Image (cartoon, coloured by chain):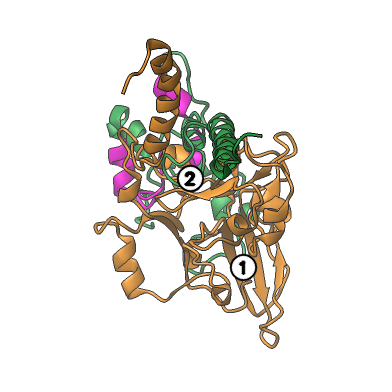
Amino acid sequence: MNVSRRQILLLLPAAAVAWEYVLADNPESSPNFKMSDHWWGMLIDISKCIGCGSCVRACATENDVPETYFRTWVERYHVSDWHIENPEVDSPKGGIDGFPQSKAEGGKNFFVPKMCNHCVDSPCSQVCPVGATFHTPDGVVLVDYEYCLGCRYCIQACPYGCRFFHPKKRTADKCTLCYHRITKGLTTACCEACPTGARQLADLKNPNDPIHAFLKTHTVQVLKPHLATGSKLFYNGLDGSVR
Amino acid sequence: MGEFKDSAHLIRLAGVFLLGLILFLVIRSVAIPKSFGQYGPFRGAALVELSSRPLAFAGHEACENCHPDVAELKSKGVHKSINCESCHGPLAKHADDPGNVKPVLPEVAQLCIRCHSENIAKPTGFPQVNAKEHFGGQTCSSCHKPHSPGLDAGGKK
């Protein structure tokens, strides 16, 4: 075959484009943090939550969450003795300033911290028309703020109400499980600030993580299990009335 | 009239398809971000953007490296499992530059009440006080030291 110099020059960029395709599907090339070694979840112990709101404040400072919007919040439940299917729930300012003394008498009272469940089969990522919501190989659901159009489908799709429309970014926003912290070997801001250890970051792929012993010895539940979202937010002592 | 050749049509058609394919590949290579598909079906650079956020909370290990005396005192009291920044606030800036950025001492009265004010929804067994009845006009820190809050005199914890 006789190929002139001009033809080779024309072929080179084409070859470069083709080679990029070969390289593009090369997974896992993060330098110091190996994503496939982790599978993140969180343990929330309701019997330890005192409703102080430290997690909400810490999350807001760590992630610049705008006021009156929440990536995590705390709810207070009052379940009366005779009507357990209809609990009274309140969450003044997401619990960011703590809770005033409960007025309700009798029944059962407790706090439930809430945040993104980082579902394995997340409804939010399934409805996104542009693929802006994605799953990292270590099991965190994140939003690509450059892809997000702000169509709000995901906000409606999330059965846990964990997403909001960011007023400045004009995109959907949610808990990132402090991805900038956990990839550096730190725990999330809410877990760091929780004074009672009611929240604990869990690495389900790490056999030495205390989560495994805890899951074996406690009655642990996820929120709305009938929706089969594959939630990785494990609640200890969760009451059936919690939605 | 020249001889009619079917193959000539096919070659031209194939040429049109080839041109379309090349056009498609060129547009694709321009439109798709370079890092797309690096870790999965999403833009890999988005992970870098999200994980490069600056820290606000330094983490208790960073505190304990420079303040082992406080960590030692705290490890003996009932507040042993509380992380430093839970009370002292986010201090990553102080940890990065301890000389210039000094942390503000938290106001004790508000700090204690944040967790220890009475509330029926708190777990039973968690120490709670009615602020007005309990203080008797004093500040918390006149009896309880936050790093080790048990009362030394009287033997009551």
Label 1, residues with CA under 10 Å away: few <14, some 14-19, many ≥20:
many
Chain for numbered disc 1:
B
Indicate yes or no whether the magenta region holds residue B75. Answer: yes
Where A152 falls versus A213 (above or below)?
Answer: above
Q: Main secondary structure of the magenta part?
A: helix
Badge 1 amino acid = Ile
Stretch of the chain drawn in magenta: B70-96
Instruction: Using the rendered image of the protein, determine whether residue A45 is visible from the camera's viewpoint.
Output: yes
Name the residue that disc number 1 marks.
B120
Where A117 falls versus B124 (above or below)?
Answer: above
* Chain identifier for the green-coloured part of the image: B
Name the residue that disc number 2 marks.
A193
Chain for numbered disc 2:
A
**Viewer-closest of B134 and B55:** B55
**Viewer-closest of A110 and A200:** A200
**Which residue sits furthest bottom?**
A82
Label 2, residues with CA under 10 Å away: few <14, some 14-19, many ≥20:
many
**Which residue sits furthest left?**
A208
Q: Position of residue B4 (x, y in %)?
A: 61, 41
For image coordinates 35% across by 18% down, the residue present is A3
For image coordinates 32% across by 38% down, the residue present is A33
* Chain identifier for the orange-coloured part of the image: A
